[in-house]
Amino acid sequence: VFEKLGPSLYEFLRKNSYRSFPIDLVREFGRQLLESVA
């Protein structure tokens, strides 16, 4: 069991009216993903 750390990608998309992510947010997601596997 994991603690809930924040909204899921689906929740974020739903609240954003299913518009695409801003490029700076995509970069931040990528940075966090790479840090997590490094």
Image (spheres, rainbow, N blue to C red):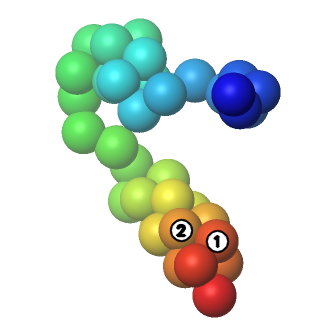
Q: Are marks 2 and 1 in contact (CB under 8 Å)?
A: yes
> Relative to 18, is 29 on the left or the right?
right
Crowding at mark 2 (Cα within 10 Å: few <14, some 14-19, many 20+):
few
Extreme-bottom residue of the structure = 38
In the rendered image, is residue 24 in sight?
no
Q: Position of residue 21 (x, y in %)?
A: 34, 43
In front here: 25 or 11?
11
- Is residue 38 depicted above or below 25 in this figure? below
Toward which corner of the image does residue 2 lie, by quadrant?
Answer: top right
Q: What percent of the width, then of the height, locates residue 34?
A: 55, 79
Question: On the rendered image, what quadrant is the C terminus found in?
Answer: bottom right
Amino acid type at mark 2: Leu
Q: Judging from the image, what secondary structure is the residue with disc 1 in?
A: helix
Quadrant location of the N terminus in the rendered image: top right
User: Dot 1, how many residues are within 10 Å of its Cα: few (below 14), some (14-19), or many (20+)?
Assistant: few
Give the label on residue 33, or none.
Answer: 2
Q: Which residue appears at 23% of the width and 28% of the height?
A: 19
Q: Which mark is residue 24?
A: none
* Image: 24 above or below 7: below
Q: Quadrant of residue 9?
A: top left
Residue 10: percent from left, percent from top: 35, 24
Is 23 situated left or right of 4 in this image?
left
How far is the residue under mark 2 from the one under mark 1? 5 Å
Helix, strand or loop at label 2? It is: helix
Q: Residue at x 49, y 27 (%)?
A: 8
Query: Residue placed at 39% from the left, 49% from the top?
Result: 22
Front-lying residue, 28 or 23: 28
Give the residue at x 58% y 79%: 37
Identified by mark 1, the residue type is Ser
